[in-house]
Image: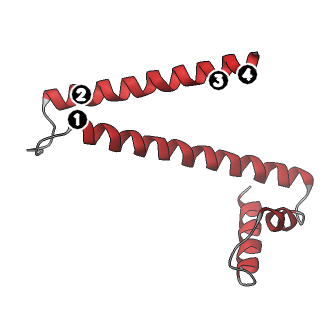
């Protein structure tokens, strides 16, 4: 897989000298130098990386939202106070509950 990614990366760099932006059509044509199995593996890898990035984005948003809401004073020492800790825990739990509810509703709509 690493060799495939190195080849793909070098193709992208090669193309970037010719163009500032690479559209989906160009990406598809660049992938044509690989076998069908290699393209599938690269596609799966890229999808996994997109999912990781989305997860990290969600964690960042959650952290920012709960931190702003719950940590209101100065942090003295190595820890936050009990009230802020409790607020952070509740904030995260409510966010997770809300995400579960949304996913459940989307699944229900999909089954209809």
Residue shown at 50% from the left, 26% from the top: 99
* Tag 2 residue: 87
Q: Which mark is residue 70?
A: 1
Q: In front: 23, or 11?
A: 23
Marks 3 and 4 in Cβ contact (< 8 Å): yes
Q: CA distance from mark 3 to mark 4?
A: 6 Å
- Where does the image place residue 68, in percent across and percent down from the top left? 26, 42
Q: Secondary structure at mark 4?
A: helix
Q: CA distance from mark 4 to mark 1?
A: 36 Å
Q: CA distance from mark 1 to mark 2?
A: 6 Å
Marks 1 and 2 in Cβ contact (< 8 Å): yes
Residue 108 location, quadrant: top right
Tell which tag, 1 or 3, sits nearer the viewer: 3
Residue shown at 74% from the left, 55% from the top: 1
Marks 4 and 1 in Cβ contact (< 8 Å): no
Residue 12 location, quadrant: bottom right
Q: Which mark is residue 110?
A: 4
User: Mark 4 packing: few (<14 Cα in 10 Å), some, or many (20+)?
Assistant: few
- Is 110 situated above or below 31? above
Mark nearer the N terminus (4 vs 1): 1
Q: Which mark is residue 106?
A: 3
Q: Secondary structure at mark 2?
A: helix
Marks 2 and 4 in Cβ contact (< 8 Å): no
């Amino acid at each position: 897989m690493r060799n495939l990614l190195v080849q793909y990366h070098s193709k992208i760099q090669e193309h970037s000298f010719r163009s500032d932006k690479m559209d989906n059509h160009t990406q598809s044509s660049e992938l044509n130098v690989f076998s069908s199995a290699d393209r599938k593996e690269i596609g799966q890898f890229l999808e996994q990386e997109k999912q990781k990035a989305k997860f990290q984005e969600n964690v960042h948003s959650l952290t920012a939202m709960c931190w702003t809401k719950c940590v209101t004073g100065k942090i003295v020492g190595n820890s936050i106070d009990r009230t802020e800790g409790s607020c952070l825990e509740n904030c995260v739990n409510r966010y997770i509950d809300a995400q579960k509810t949304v996913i459940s509703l989307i699944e229900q709509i999909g089954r209809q």
